[in-house]
Amino acid sequence: MRYLPQPARADDHYELVGRAGASSPQQAGTLDRLAPLAPSLVALYRERIRAQRPLPDTRMSADESLDMSETYTRLRASAAPEGIGATVLLNSGNAGFRCCYCEIEVARHVDHFAPKVVHPEWALSIANLVPSCGSCNGHKQHLDIAPSGNRLPHPYLDEPVPDDHQFVFADVTKTPRSYKAAFRLAWPATTAPFQRESLTLLFERLHLLERYGLEATILLSEDRETITRKEGRGKLPTWARKKAASMRTIYGPNHFKTVLYQGLAQLT
């Protein structure tokens, strides 16, 4: 994968999406209390999380949690200008966006990167809403963004791994009836420790290597006739390398399709 895709950049100017969804004085009061904290998401992320400093504890009371939940629900259905940015993300599945974590499935969910249960002040912040598939959203659950010094990489706020840093690899094997691929991580010596730790956590938490393997089985099955023909003519390595180069141009060096065809080119 090209680290993580960016269908929309979450920059510093994004703030709380607004009070458009508030339907009562109590809900408006909750937003008023949390609003001063919300614009600090980007700054806190860059300064505190990268320095592995703890974030403030801003857990909501039961009433505030209900207020925020109702406000968020109303905002999803709101056509007000304040809600447009959130609506684009919330309806990202209709635009065909792939999940920002796995790039396998279409993003039909919106994940609160910093869980709204733990950090309600960012529940309505555009920078905290990322398009996700149901699998990744379910695996991630309420994992805090800075547990014990480790953290998941933010799809839009983290610095990407340089394009020449390949860390995902695939070992392709041939069985009597099919081809299979096993994916693994191998880090270049130049990879920064915080990148290695956060990406490892991402792959482990979301079970990406296993899911890549399942997806690869489907792709190899679809290409089986071509692979068999190329292999019989001794042209499989050349064809697979060209396919990998094409995938690399489109998706980047660590996308599972790129490394799958790289592994296929090395099949003996």
Image (cartoon, rainbow, N blue to C red):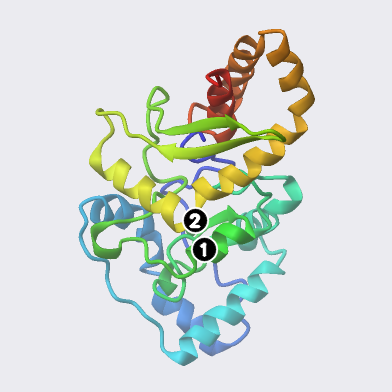
x, y percentage for residue 152? 38, 54
Q: Give coordinates of residue 80: x percent, y percent.
A: 68, 64
Instruction: Give 55 or 167, whichever is nearer the viewer.
Output: 167
- The amino acid type, in three-letter code, at marker 2 is Leu
Left or right: residue 101 compared with residue 77: left
Foreground: 253 or 128?
A: 253
Residue 22 visible in the picture: no
Q: Residue at x 57, y 43 (%)?
A: 212
Labels 1 & 2 near each other (Cβ < 8 A): yes
Badge 2 density bin: few <14, some 14–19, many ≥20, Cα 10 Å = some
Which image quadrant for residue 130? bottom right
Q: CA distance from mark 1 to mark 2?
A: 5 Å
Q: Could you tell me which residue is drawn at 72 percent across and 8 percent down? A: 233
From the image, tell me which residue sits under label 1: 139
Q: Is residue 66 visible?
A: yes
Dot 1 or dot 2: first in sequence order is 1
Give how far across and how far down residue 192 sits, in percent: 25, 36
Look at the picture and state if 258 lies above or below 3.
Answer: above
